[in-house]
Every structure is written in C-alpha cells, then in structure tokens.
Image (tube, coloured by chain):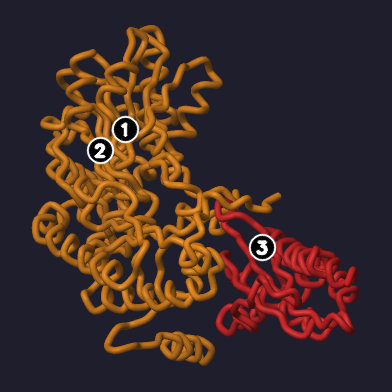
Amino acid sequence: MATEVTTLTEERAATKTNGGVKLPIYMDNHATTPVDPRVLEEMLPYFTDRFGNAASRNHSFGWAGEEAVETARERIAKLIGATTKEIIFTSGATESDNLAIKGVAEMYREKGNHIITAVTEHKAVLDTCKRLEKYGYRVTYLPVQKDGLVDLDDLKRAIDNKTILVTIMAANNEIGVVQPIAEIGKLCHEKGVIFHSDATQAVGKIPIEVIKQNLDLLSISAHKMYGPKGVGALYVRRKSPRVQISPIIDGGGHERGMRSGTLNVPGIAGLGKACALCYEEMPQESVRMSGMRDRLRDRIMSNLDEVYINGSMEHRLPQNLNISFAYVEGESLLMGINDVAVSSGSACTSATLEPSYVLKALGTGDDLAHSSIRFGLGRFNTEAEVDYVADRVVETVQRLRELSPLYEMAKEGIDLKSVKWAAE
Amino acid sequence: MSYSNKVIDHYNNPRNVGSMDKNSAEVGTGLVGAPECGDVMKLQIKVNPATNVIEDAKFKTFGCGSAIASSSLATEWVKGKTIDEALAIKNTEIVKELSLPPVKIHCSVLAEDAIRAAIGDWKKKQSTPVAVAEAKV
C-alpha cells in the first residue's frame, strides 16, 4: 500500500501546470483517443455482472450480452445510416480492412482480379493489397493530387472489366484530407464495382451516410472516437447491390459467418455508446473542433514565416492540422515541445528512416516532409491548450531556426535546391 | 524514443552555436548531409596558423536532437586540439559519450564527417593562390 501511495504522489508531482493548462497536453487524437467517461460507464457492467457470452442462447447471462451487442449494432447503424444486419463486429479497423478487401477478393475471384486503391491509404489497406498481388491479383495504386485528393478521372480510367473492388479511404490519418467518397461510390456503382472505404478517421467526426455516399463496405474503429481499443466494425451492404464477402477467420460462425470468434461484449458496448455520443454531439463538436484548429493554425502562421499546410484545407477533417516548418527537422521540434503529444512525418521518428509516404505522394519534398508535424485535436482539448501549444511551437521553431544552417543559407539568399549536398 | 541526459543537455543548451566568416583564411567550413535526408551540419573551425591549434569552433545543425547533440559535442571536443588531434576523433567516441542508440549512429558519422570537411576546407585555404602569391613575393 505504501508503495502505491508514493507512486500516485509522484505521478501528481510530475503533472506540471502552466497558466491553468495541465501538462502534458494530448493533441495526437488521430493516433488514438481517450475513452469518454460515458463510454467507460456503459462498458463496465459487461466485464463483471453481465459477463455472459452473447452467443449463449439459453440463459439470462447470454441474453444480457446479446442485448448489449444488438443495442450497439443499432447505434452504429444509426450513425452511418445503415441497418443492423449490415454491421459486423471485428477487432478494429485493420481487421475490417483485411476482411473487406480479402473477403471481396476471394468471393469475386471468378468475376475479376483487379483492385484499385490510392497511394495515400493506410498500411492496413496497402499491405493487404500487396499481399493479394502475391496471390495473382492486380492492384492499381492511384496517385493523389497536390491537395491529397484522388482525381476522379484517374479512377474512371483505371476501372476495367476485371475490376472487382475500389478501396479509397474516407479521411486520411496524416493530413485529414477527406476524399469525395460519394462521387467515387457513384462511379463504382455505374461500373458495377464494389466500393470499400476505410473510414477509421472519418466516422464520428464527419457525417457518413452509406446509402447517400454509395458505400458498399465501410471500416470503423472505436478507439479513434473515444471508444476502447481492440474493437471495430465493418459495414457490409445487403441491398442494391447485395455484397458478399468470404470470411478470413473461420470458426463458430458468429456474425452471420463473416467473422467467427466470441464477441467482445464490453468493447462492442463501448463502440456503440461512442457512436451514440458522436451522433448526438457531432454537429456542435465539429464546429468547436474546426474553430480550435483554425485558431491553432492562425496563431502559428501569424508568428512564423515559411510554414506550409500539407493537404487541402477545404476538404479536411475539422480536427486535423498538418504543417511543415521549413528548415526545422520534425523530431527536434517534437523534442522541444516535449510537454505536448503530437506526431511528425519525419524519418527520424520512424524505424525506416524514410519520411512520410503520404506527404511524398502530395509532392511535398523530402526536406519539408522531414519538417512536418501532425496536430490531432479532440473532444477534450481546450482553447487554452491550443494557445499554449501554438506558443510552444512558435518559440521552438524560432529557436531551432537560429540553430539551422539551412535557415541561415536561405536568409542569405542561397537557393537550397541549387546546393550540391555532400550526402552519402 | 527516449534520449540520454547528455543528448537532452546538448539539445537544450547547445555549445558554440553560430557562424564565422567563411571567407577568412583562418576559418575552415564543413557542410555535410542533405535536407532530403533530414540532417545538415555546418561546422566551422578557426585555426592558429602558427600552431595549427583550433582556437574556436562553431556549428549550426538541421536535424534531430541526436544530430544537434553530436555536432555540439564535436565543437567542444575540437576546441584546443591541433588539426591532427581533431582528425583522430572517431564517431564511435561520440556514440559512447552521448549513448546514441543504433538508429542514431549516422548522426555521429555526420559529425565526424563535418570535422573532417572543416579541416579539409581549412587545409585547402592554406595552399590557395593567396598563400602561393605570398610565397612568391
């Protein structure tokens, strides 16, 4: 007990405050979000009192579990304009992406072997497509325009008579760019091609309506919208067209045979509650988020020169800001704002030493990709936090530019592109 | 990734930041790395031509915390050393001093390269036409 008390005291002591702002500040909500206390409250009984297996059909423990699962299904369906039978529970968006893509690939193998995706997709989609290439599928990776959007004409040209699936994300995890999914879906339906969208970053943040947006398959994650980690869902359209997928996990035939495995009842209850909260609060929340995001952008950009926004500002999640700070390397910037949790597209933050492939796809030079920071605002951020973060960023960029030979050279009028760098 | 205390110290309080006149005959400038790779170091030395002792050193670095720390440490180490002593500094010594993880070893390599490039530049200046002309007179 004594040890425990000490630890807690130490933890409190480590939490600094600055001008009413509690540190550290979390502003990396595209990576994950904290569980909303209302979501946690919904989940808790399903760990203990109502622990039953939702597949147990002959006692009240099982019925309680099943009821929680069906309530969650209704809440998810309501958020995206689907019906309950179209919602399949999974372990998260990575599994949903795998199930959608591999499931369609196997089911429609006789119809064709061609899949279309885009270069800025999440690895859960790209690596799944790469695996299918090993099995004889043909994959087209569409480029994106400078603003991060897919060109619909490129897509139209890429579709051929062997195309069975188009998979394009709803909103990008790095730059928050929102793709024209309704138009993409329309094009797919005109050509009789199934349309899947990884909507991990979009669901709960911007309106998604599967019928209006011509979606056939949609991947959903709980932990990006204040739900728990380890649970997600896949929407599978049942009417016009009816979409069929082969399972990738075999077993007890849960989820209408599409995804076997005992259902994660507490997680599913949490996902459902998270969706219900987003359904109710999205209109006000998105206004508040874009207001704070713009405040962050303006406060940074009015105090620094040579700062560049990556991706379209118009077609963008209200929570996202991705900025490159020329002449400053991203990881050193993160180190300077170490009481703020954000992420960088710099190579140094990844194991591969390659800068962000998403930024490279926009045509952002490697130098600017190394200088990028992703801010992901969330439900629990405040304006005071935004101001604190902006000020810390400005002050750190200024300090690092004083330290930067590139900034000095640029100020001397040297064109950095014309310099012959002595790189290995 | 967590940083060693020494890296954090150099990052927070970098030693010898600045620039010297790159056209001065006493100054050698090394510019290594490339913006596309995420690291550029500029290291300058001021050498006493009579003794070959590095009397001053300055740096500026675009790069991660470990790159900043490596170059900051390099300026500390070369100061007061002769050209030959400075050429003997190995990147592995920088790795050891800053406890750099394997993924950051390239930062120490770059710092060693910067020292060598600065010395090379200074040596080149010692045999420039100006010096030759003086010799002829």
Of A82 and B16, which appears nearest the observer?
B16
Label 2 residue SS: loop
Q: Chain of mark 2?
A: A
- Report the amino acid beneath label 1: Ile
Q: Are marks 1 and 3 in contact (CB under 8 Å)?
A: no
Q: Which chain is red?
A: B
Image x and y of residue A241, in percent: 19, 18
Residue B124 relative to residue A67: left or right? right
Label 1 residue SS: loop
Q: Which residue appears at 31% of the width and 79% of the height?
A: A388
Q: Which residue is mark 2?
A: A179
Q: Are marks 2 and 3 in contact (CB under 8 Å)?
A: no
Q: Quadrant of residue A306?
A: bottom left
Q: Which residue is mark 1?
A: A168
Q: Residues within 10 Å of mark 2 (few under 14, many from 20)?
A: many
Image x and y of residue A214, in percent: 17, 27
Q: CA distance from mark 2 to mark 3?
A: 42 Å
Residue A281 relative to residue A406: left or right? left
Mark found first going from the N terminus, 2 or 1: 1
Q: Which chain is orange?
A: A
Q: Is residue A211 above or below residue A177?
A: above
Residue A218 relative to residue B114: left or right? left
Mark number displayed over residue B31: 3
Residues beneath discs 1 and 3 located on the same chain: no
Q: Are marks 2 and 1 in contact (CB under 8 Å)?
A: yes
- Report the amino acid beneath label 2: Gln
Q: CA distance from mark 1 to mark 3?
A: 43 Å
Q: Is residue A85 above or below residue A283?
A: above
